[in-house]
Image (spheres, rainbow, N blue to C red):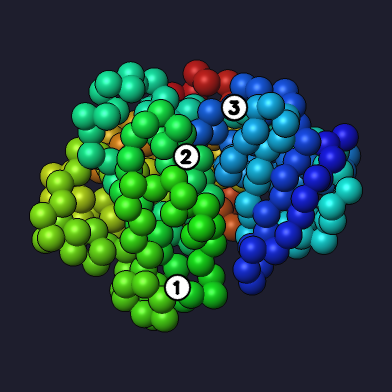
């Protein structure tokens, strides 16, 4: 059992938990995810790691209530436990494999949308700990839905907050702020965008015209987290990939976002899943790693 040391609601329907999981904390890296189960009969829920403390043996997760299991998860309190807390899973951010010297030469921009702020935070924090200052754009629909602002401000080189309705910070979508920064003379060598699929799609459309290489995290489309369900099947550069086993990070300019979002809608029903399985054959799942 994995004890919840702290549980709190960050804002409407978005929760944060600090979980005692020393083995995961010891080996996880920014960009990776875990799978939790509330009990032996519970569904597997993949969640990107928001933070970790190797010395304390804790891992921080942030999640939004979007279905029955996450609503049940939101009812857990400090002192309760998860039956399973498995990880780290997925590939770490490519940034952790680069030398400090190379990273310090790069001008890095992070773009976080909504709950995507949670998986952006550990990457920015990791860079900060290695002496690298990155610019960060955090976007939310409205001020009340903004999360982790103070935490991000403490580790970002420059933090730009924007709200769709203009209720706080800059006004408009994150793409407007990207364009504004470039127009102001900012230059970036790489952009890392994490958030809703539609947000990442339009960030990539813009950065491609601006000539900024862009990495996206496709954790929003993961369901099972093992490749066996086929939910996170996506086409990247004309090749079939699975976010949970091949990612979750990919070259955003190569991701077929339209296909992925259309497929998400089809996957929601049992009939749709059966249709996809019949159409995709051996490439429907990625559990064995050799289906491609």
Q: Residue at (31%, 76%) from the top-left corner?
A: 171
> Circle 2 is placed at which residue position?
125
Vertical arrangement, residue 257 with respect to residue 27, above or below: below
Q: Nearer the viewer, mark 1 or mark 2?
A: 2
> Mark 1 falls on what kind of element?
loop
Q: Residues within 10 Å of mark 1 (few under 14, many from 20)?
A: some
Residue 164 position within the rendered picture, expressed as x and y whole percent measured from the top left: 38, 75
Q: Secondary structure at mark 3?
A: loop
Q: Is residue 213 above or below residue 101?
A: below
Q: Which residue is mark 3?
A: 28
Query: For this rendering, which residue is in front, 239 or 73?
Result: 73
Q: Is residue 84 left or right of residue 181?
A: right
SS at mark 2 in the image: helix
In front here: 223 or 55? 55
Q: Which quarter shows the C terminus?
A: top left
Q: Are marks 2 and 3 in contact (CB under 8 Å)?
A: no
Number of the label disc, if any, that sits on residue 18: none
Asked if residue 46 lies left or right of residue 23, the reply is left
- Which residue, given by chain and number where applicable, does mark 1 sit on? 141
> Of the residues under marks 2 and 3, which one precedes in the sequence?
3
């Amino acid at each position: 059992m994995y004890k919840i040391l702290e549980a709190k609601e960050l804002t409407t329907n978005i929760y944060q938990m600090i979980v005692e999981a020393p083995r995961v904390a010891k080996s996880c890296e920014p960009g990776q995810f875990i799978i939790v189960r509330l009990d032996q009969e519970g569904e597997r829920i993949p969640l990107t790691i928001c933070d970790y403390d190797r010395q304390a043996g804790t891992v921080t997760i942030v999640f939004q209530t979007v279905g029955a299991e996450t609503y049940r998860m939101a009812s857990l309190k400090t002192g309760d436990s998860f039956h399973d807390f498995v990880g780290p899973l997925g590939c770490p951010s490519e940034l952790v494999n680069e030398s400090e010297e190379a990273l310090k030469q790069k001008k890095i921009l992070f773009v976080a949308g909504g709950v995507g702020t949670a998986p952006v935070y550990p990457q920015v924090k990791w860079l900060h700990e290695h002496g690298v200052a990155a610019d960060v754009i955090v976007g939310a629909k409205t001020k009340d839905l903004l999360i982790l602002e103070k935490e991000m401000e403490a580790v970002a080189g420059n933090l730009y907050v924007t709200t769709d309705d203009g209720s706080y910070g800059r006004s408009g979508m994150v793409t407007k702020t990207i364009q504004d920064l470039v127009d102001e003379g900012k230059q970036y060598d790489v952009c890392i965008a994490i958030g809703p699929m539609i947000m990442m799609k339009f960030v990539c459309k813009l950065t491609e015209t601006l000539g900024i290489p862009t990495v996206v995290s496709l954790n929003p489309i993961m369901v099972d987290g093992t490749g066996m369900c086929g939910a996170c099947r996506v086409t990247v550069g004309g090749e079939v990939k699975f976010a949970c086993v091949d990612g979750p990070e990919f070259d955003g300019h190569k991701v077929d976002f339209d296909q992925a979002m259309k497929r998400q809608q089809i996957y929601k029903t049992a009939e749709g899943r059966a249709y996809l399985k019949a159409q995709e054959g051996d490439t429907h799942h990625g559990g064995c790693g050799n289906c491609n």
